Amino acid sequence: VDSFSFPLRSVGAPSQLFTCPSRRQRLEVCNLQSHGAGPLCMSTSSSSEHDNTELAWRYAKKPLLRIGSKGATLTHGNSLRQLLESHTAVKVKVNTRKFGTMEHAFEVLRDLCEESGGPKGIELLQAREGDKIILFGMPGTLQRIASGDFPPPVVEQEQEEDE
């Protein structure tokens, strides 16, 4: 693990994670002083769990459900339930103005999904604030990602040669 520190002004959160996709390394920034300018420590480390989470993000190609400015309804919850039953991991694009935060949007959609007959314990696999996309997963998906069982490996189809 390589680490270094340098002074930086207000960071906003006590700890933040950044990823360098080209190096597949996780960069953790933790504010050592909670008030004012102070030193920060950064450490980089390869993280297979983070790599697996990125693979899960890429496995779900595009958002299959969109929530507009009017917010979410029970119909959205039912659609999310059906999509999760078919796909295990589903991206949902949300208009955060109605919800406030991505976490709140996740909680509302999870509750609507459970209300419409979905399983308890639907998981937030990842949320990308800039893209306004949340990756939902069936219960147990986070554990499968951590163990490397999800997403399933890509099987390339061999083309049979006619002789």
Image (tube, rainbow, N blue to C red):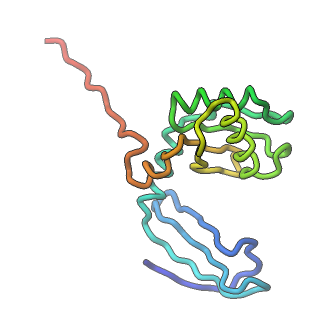
- Residue 93 location, quadrant: top right
> On screen, 92 above or below 15?
above
Describe residue 13's horizontal placement relative to residue 3 as left or right: right
Residue 81, percent from left and from top: 62, 31
Residue nearest the viewer, comparing 75 with 128: 75
Q: How many marks?
A: 0
- Is 77 displayed left or right of 121 in the figure? right
Q: Residue furthest top?
A: 163
| Picture layout, residue 38 above or below residue 140 | below
Q: Find residue 11 and report its image quarter.
A: bottom right
Q: Residue at x 49, y 46 (%)?
A: 141
Is 140 left or right of 74, judged from the image as shown? left
Q: Position of residue 68 (x, y in %)?
A: 80, 33
Residue at left offset 43%, top offset 55%:
146
Quadrant location, the C terminus = top left
Residue located at (82% from left, 50% from top): 100
The quadrant in which the N terminus is found is bottom left
The residue at the point 59 percent across, 26 percent down is 82
Q: Position of residue 32 (x, y in %)?
A: 66, 85
Position of residue 31 relative to residue 109, above or below, is below
